Amino acid sequence: MKVVTIVGARPQFIKAAAMSRVLRQRHREILLHTGQHYDYKMSGVFFDGLEMPAPDVNLEVGSGSHGAQTGAMLAGIEKVLLAERPEWLLIYGDTNSTLAGALAAAKLNIPVAHVEAGLRSFSRRMPEEVNRVVADHLSQLLLCPSETAIKNLASEGISKGAHLVGDVMLDILQWAKERAKPSTGETLRRHNLESKSYLLATVHRSENTDDAARLAGILSAFDRIKEPILFPVHPRTRKAIDASGSRLRSHVRMVEPLGYLEMVALSASARMILTDSGGLQKEAYWLGVPCVTLREETEWVETVSCGWNQLAGSATNGIVGAVNSFVAPASRPALYGSGCVAAACVDLL
């Protein structure tokens, strides 16, 4: 079986790392990197840390408006699909790379398999919501992480080809935890941190970075929190912070984006995680670290209902209040699979 896999952004590299290890044992995979995350800090360092195979194709699309970026990806992916004619196109998550892959394959009548299908925020203001809805409706195989995702698809009339498999990110997290453990002490020393005595923060979604008022509210909250905050800054976020003229206090340590193993070590050792990332919400849950989500909604509703994730939005007082008062419960039920999800997905393919 020949499969073309589309990746373009850091969360997709993580998911693809888990799938590629299993897929390549029996089948041929052609890994196509759109170049949506294109510099070493956002792309290369992740490939290295995850021990992923190098992409067979890199479109090097780079940044740009949604239309320009997606259009360039669409043309490049179509060219590869026409040359390779795979049995499946494999897509992940909800980025512009996901959307472009689904559209290109659908127009060439190549079946699409969507890993992480069925997620919904029910907010069409989010570009990611539009991408995931369109991708799901163009897919023949929908690999869902939760019962909620299955129900979301059913409510939209999609039941054929939908399977509850769990989340492939758990597969790779379990692998990464063991590899990160020996160097955790050195990682903490390098950042001048003590275990469980700091917060880890990430902000990257366009709803927060492209809205000056929302970004200001989040940054103001970081300033008011009286604990060390390690803040690996996405390039888009840094650009927005620089444009705003904001200057954060010294306890907020802004650093360059970090590799996956380092992020796993720092996440596991944090007292709490502040993020608008879907992947980090899940990883916080699996690692047993309380999470405050800097959004009004989340696709990972189970982490909220279990009491380990609190939605705080972007208002300063709401974030500070959540950080100061949030106490996670004693229990943490298993969510999103067993850690052997990639094998189940490859079997279904």
Image (spheres, grey):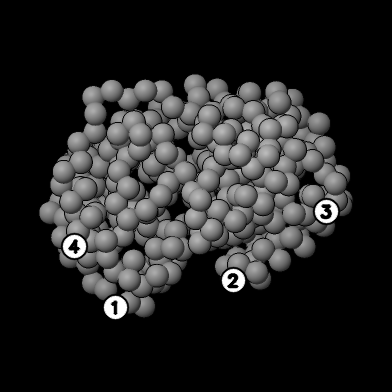
* Disc 3, SS: helix
Q: Which mark is residue 107?
A: 3
Earlier in the chain: of badge 2 and badge 3, it is 2
At label 4, counting other C-alpha atoms closer than 10 Å, the crowd grade (few under 14, some 14-19, many 20 or more) is: many
The disc at residue 220 is: none
Considering only order in the chain, which callout, 1 or 4, is on the residue closer to the N terminus? Answer: 4
Question: Residue 268, position in %: x, y?
Answer: 31, 35
| CB-based contact (under 8 Å), mark 1 and mark 3 | no
Nearer to us: label 2 or label 3: 3
Q: Position of residue 202 (x, y in %)?
A: 35, 53
Residue at 77 percent of width and 34 percent of height? 28
Count every numbered label the image shows and give the total: 4
| Residue at image location 71% in from the left, 66% down from the top | 71
Secondary element at image label 2: loop
Above/below status of 46 relative to 141: below
Of labels 2 and 4, earlier in sequence is: 2
- Nearer to me, 112 or 239: 112
Q: Residue at x 31, y 31 (%)?
A: 288
| Quadrant of the drawing holding the C terminus | top right
User: Whole-Å distance between the Cαs marked 1 and 3?
Assistant: 45 Å
Check disc 2 and report the residue beneath it: 65
Q: Amino acid at mark 2?
A: Ser
Real-space CA distance between mark 1 and mark 2, rounded to the nearest whole angstrom: 24 Å
According to the picture, the residue beneath numbered tag 1 turns out to be 245
Eyeballing the image, is 3 above or below 68?
Answer: above
Q: Which residue is mark 4?
A: 223
**Which is closer to the viewer, label 1 or label 2?**
2
Question: Which three-letter amino acid code belongs to the residue tagged 3?
Answer: Lys
Q: Would you call the spot at circle 2 few (<14 residues within 10 Å), some (14-19), or many (20 or more)? A: few
